[in-house]
Amino acid sequence: MDSNSNNIVQAKALGKQVSSPEGTLTILDDINLSIKQGESLAVIGVSGSGKSTLLGLLAGLDTPTSGEVILNSTILNDLDEDGRARIRNQSVGFVFQSFHLLPGLTALENTALPLELAGSEQADEIAKQKLADVGLSDRIHHYPNQLSGGEQQRVAIARAFASNPKILFADEPTGNLDQKTAQRIIDLIFKMNKDNGTTLVMVTHDDALASLCDRKVVMAGGQITNDT
Amino acid sequence: MNTFKFAFTGLKRDWYSGELRLIGISILIAVACLSSVSFFTDRVRRATEQQATELLAADLVLISSTKIKNEYIDNADGAGLIISLNESFRSVVVNGDNLELAEVKAVDANYPIRGNLRTSDDLFKQEQINDSIPASGTVWVDSRLLQALQVKLGESINVGAAELIVDKILTYEPDRGGDLFNIAPRLLMNRVDLDKTKLILPGSRIQYRLLLGGKSESIDLYRNQLKLDENLRLQGIKDARPEIKTALVRAEQFLGLAALVSIALAGLAIAMSAQRFAVRHYDNCAIMRCLGLQQREITQIYFYQLMMLGLICSLIGCVIGFFAQEGLNQMMIGMTQQSLPKPSWRPVLSGIFTGLITVLAFALPQLMRLRKISPLRVLRKDLTPLPLNNYVIYTVAIIALVLLSPWQSGDIALTIYTVLGLFLTALVLAVSAKLIIKLLKQLQPKLKMAARYGLANVSRRSNQSVMQIMGIGIGVTVMLLLTLVRTDLLAGWQNRLPDDAPNYFLINIQPDQVDSIRSHLSTLLNNDIALYPMIRGRLTKINERNVNPDDYENPRANRLAAREFNLSYADTMQDDNRVVAGEWWSKGENTENYFSVEEGIAETLGISIGDSLSYSIAGQEIKGKVVNLRWVEWDSFNANFFVVSNTSALKTYPSTFISSLFIPDSKRSILIELIKQYPSITVFDIDAILKQVRAIMNQVVRTVEFVFIFTILTGIAVLFAALQSTHDERTHEAALMSALGANRKQIISGLIAEFMLLGIITGILSAIAASIIELALAEYVFKMEIVINPLLWLIAPLACCLIIVATGLIGTRKVLASSPMLILRKT
Ligand SMILES: Nc1ncnc2c1ncn2[C@@H]1O[C@H](COP(=O)(O)OP(=O)(O)O)[C@@H](O)[C@H]1O
Ligand SMILES: [Mg+2]
């Protein structure tokens, strides 16, 4: 039990099954995983191996069919959707492959969104600070469609860090970017991660990127086949 | 490749994956609405016509000044029509020393084919429906004749050479018709006794009538095959009394409007769904193009799909429409205690035709964009075909509407007004919505969370928001027109025939009796009594040109030119008249003679402002100038005149006075007193006709209300289609918000804020649009004065908010249920 205390995320016998026309389909099977506070973890594997599904379960976006997830000392299974939403809002940040900014909101408004959802009074100031951190001070009133892909992803990173999360989940954050931009984004993620003392869980199929992380987990067919 | 087969399998696949379902359902709702509207209006129209036939006593009447030739009768017999013959003529009827000129009608046993005779057993007593006609040797006379001849029931009178017993008082005969004030007292007798009267002589002025009844198809057939000779004229239901004609025309206008508007709304819903369908098929098409499909084949595939979808859904829609109108009919039976004629099959045809045209006109242009998809899109997602030029969409839609509308409303002026109105409304709504959103956008940074999110959504989807506001706005405008405004318009119409509309006319009042009768009745009835002078004259010249009846081909004009009619004089215009051209003269002594002519008769006879008219009155010629044309509210049942002069022009000519008044049942004894005191006055009872008109009006109003429920349903379909068009985006955004930690409440309040904003903008714009349209309709189409309900400004935004928020939340139920996992799956 003591060894668990500095685990920020813990998955126990995690399984996910869905029903399909061909019968029940097992996407994840008996996943056991502990991630320490401050650790950076890469999840790699071929497409369809279940990486995103695992990420979703660990981040409390979805519920498992069996097993449980403990995130920041909270057993997610015990929470309803709104409870999990609160956890996501307070403890978790996301960066996605396709940025997922709200197109109607400016960079500033997008960044401030998680803070506003939490009812923060200083949403705007904090958001401005975070945008400065990612080097976008001069673009805060621009809309997503006025920004390049790399810039959009930087806004997404600022948004992810806005609520000072304990853990950052990134699902192929460079998948939609050219190599040069991708490199800058990776550098930024690692820098922000270090500055904020955040735990990082990153899905990627880029081996070079994975080797930058403290730890690598390889997935195949819904199971962890290697954990180094 | 076999594009037809491909289209068919595609249709099945897309149906199950829910892609085409939206378009299909729109067609289905549209056709269900349309066909129930047209099934029902068709039946109501025939029912209303049936009621109108009562005023002819038949479905069709042939009127002749000579004996009706046997071939007409034989043909009617051959066509399986019910036949009734009658003769009417004027003759002096005698009771001892009392002589009176009466209008005699000799009828056979089939009379009346439509409607009933009503009689009573004493003066001003309760009347009863009578299924028979006077037995041979007896006559029924109206109360005027009874009064004039001072005869009692059971006593005999002389009609020509025959002595006949007065059996009953005739209170109502369906086809009394004609000009209310020109007809003599009535006498109804059996045709069998006609020879005994020895009144049918060569040269005597007799009107021969052939009354026909039967199925409307047989009647139409007979009517179309009829070759009229010069002595003969026809009277169908629409040629009947002007009051009824107005009621029928107006009913058709209201119902036609309802049908037309539902097509337009359905079209809008289809266009919106089709656009969504097209957008969702970009990738499919790009891949198919990559795999070698030609543009032509893509066009074919979607054309076939739409045709199949249109046909299937139209058929189902017709079936639903049929049952819906049957249910409607059941409701009507409960309310009116009377069943409608059987539905005809025409609405099925028009339903399918309309369904196909609507889906092609509104969906095809959207889907045609798919053929323009570049195969390169598989590599570059942003290669979206150029959005269709909106003008193209609107032009096609308007052409389709114009093509379809006469089918529905049968009225070209109404169609043009409605289509133009809808188009203008759409345009104005779109432009103002765009402006308002732009202005509101400035507010965004100052707003709180939910409101900001809502406004952000509205303004970001600016184009879609404009589309939604336009779509919902048209729907709501129409709904407003149909609910609030309809009540104003219908109330306006019904108010013309208030409960105290005149039900008696007094005629033959001598000039020296005017003052005493006015004061006498005014005290008894507690009301001001208006008396109008009446002078009989015949039009002899228009602009020095002799008026010759034969110059007019139009039979109505011919008749008007031939006969004497009633002129009147006044220095102030009657309340229920309105000057439509020129100006009313000022009060006081004018040295010149002025005429004011009713616009309808002016048109028929070719009279315009500035013309000089000459009338022959009691052997004297009087000439005057037409200074204005007048619109007359004929259905007010007040005494009204085709031609009115200034007082000084006609005052010196021999005249009698006429008055119309309302006498409640409880005060009928006043009449008996009046007749005793002034024996020369004749009382004319129009209560029965009034009841008839009122019954038709009530029926029309009720059916219009029912029919508009369906139109409102199509309005809601538009609302759904508009919401559906942004459904995918909403789902995605809700998932994202949820991933960022928004709880259910926050997501819902964001949606509510967006819908409320849309609702308020839509509500205000719709209220403006509805009031403008209402005023225009009242002024130009229905020709009545109305007051815009001030509640509109409160109710419209409030109702829009409620409707849009409620429908929006129902429509986005699935959005709320969407898992935040969605955003990990979607790229
Ligand atoms: N809701 C679902 N229904 C059916 N199959 C699913 C569902 N979610 C994921 N899958 C399947 O599970 C497998 C793993 O998916 P995913 O976690 O997205 O893989 P990865 O991110 O590693 O590419 C895939 O084969 C995917 O098709
Ligand atoms: Mg994945």
Image: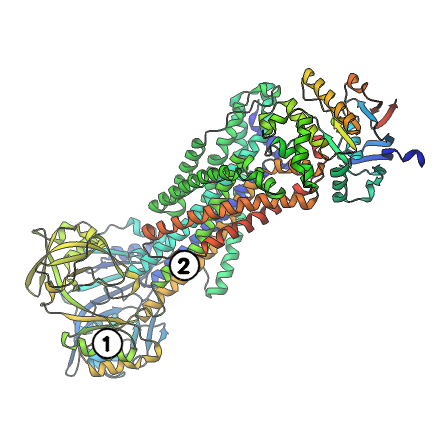
* Left or right, residue B314 beside residue B214: right
Whole-percent x and y of residue A46? 78, 22
Q: Which quadrant of the structure image shows residue A211?
A: top right
Looking at this view, is B61 or B752 the one in front? B752
Q: Chain of mark 2?
A: B
- Find out if the beta carbon at label 2 lies less than 8 Å from the nearest ligand 1 atom: no
Looking at this view, is B239 or B743 the one in front? B743
* Figure quadrant of the C terminus of chain B: top right
- Find out if the beta carbon at label 1 lies less than 8 Å from the nearest ligand 1 atom: no
Report which residue position mark 1 lands on. B144
Residue sticking out furthest to the left: B620
Q: Which quadrant of the structure image shows residue A166?
A: top right
Whole-percent x and y of residue B686? 29, 70
Report which residue position mark 2 lands on. B700
Q: Which of the two discs, 1 and 2, labels the residue nearer the N terminus?
A: 1
- Local SS, label 1: helix
* Left or right, residue B724 beside residue A134: left
Q: Residues within 10 Å of mark 1 (few under 14, many from 20)?
A: many
Q: Which quadrant of the structure image shows residue B690?
A: bottom left
Q: Is residue B685 visible?
A: yes
* Left or right, residue B12 beside residue B337: right
Residue B240 versus residue B768 in the image, above or below: below
Amino acid type at image mark 2:
Val
Q: Chain of mark 1?
A: B
The image quadrant where one finds ligand 2 is: top right
